Amino acid sequence: MKCTATLSLAIVLVLSHWAPLRVDRAAAQSCLTGHELREAVRSGSVLRPAQVTSGMTGQVLQVQLCHSGQGLVWQVTELGSNGQVIGHVIDARTGQRLR
């Protein structure tokens, strides 16, 4: 159990360092606060995080709602089944994968 916890902590530390590099840096600087995110979801102007991540086969590590040139986007960081960190940018209104 201790070995598993240590390995999990190591993975989280590595991913927390590298994962932000996989998403749009400009958009990451203008992400919504928790309150703004909840209000956007509550108003129905954006899809819920579970709706945009439901088809992902890996482990979802982070989900952020951010401004971009296309409007609001979900930035999702996923740990793929092969151990690769994958960054997704998804249109927050339509669910269309932009990148």
Image (cartoon, rainbow, N blue to C red):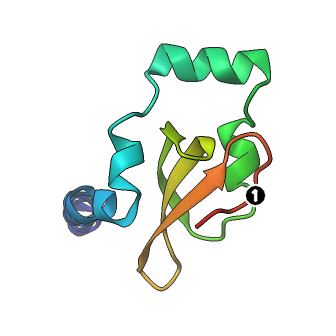
State the residue at coordinates (73%, 16%). 42
Tell me residue 24's x, y (percent).
40, 56
- Determine the residue located farthest toward the bottom in the rendered image: 82
Q: Dot 1 lies on which element?
A: loop
Tell me residue 56's x, y (percent).
67, 65
State the residue at coordinates (74%, 55%). 54
Of the pair 52 and 12, the residue shown nearer to us: 52
Tell me residue 20's x, y (percent).
31, 56
State the residue at coordinates (25%, 55%). 16
To which quarter of the image does residue 22 belong? Answer: bottom left
- Vertical placement of 14 versus 50: above or below? below
- Vertical placement of 12 versus 65: above or below? below
Total tally of numbered discs in the picture = 1
- Determine the residue located farthest toward the front in the rendered image: 69
Report whether 67 appears left or right of 39.
left
- Vertical placement of 41 versus 68: above or below? above
For label 1, the residue is 96
State the residue at coordinates (58%, 67%). 99
Of the pair 33 and 25, the residue shown nearer to us: 25
Q: The disc labelled 1 sits on which kind of residue?
A: Gln
Report whether 25 appears left or right of 56.
left
Tell me residue 15's x, y (percent).
28, 63
Which quadrant of the rendered structure holds the N terminus?
bottom left
To which quarter of the image does residue 47 belong? Answer: top right
Classed neighbour count for the residue bearing mark 1: other residues with Cα under 10 Å, few (<14), some (14–19), many (≥20) = few
Of the pair 18 and 68, the residue shown nearer to us: 68
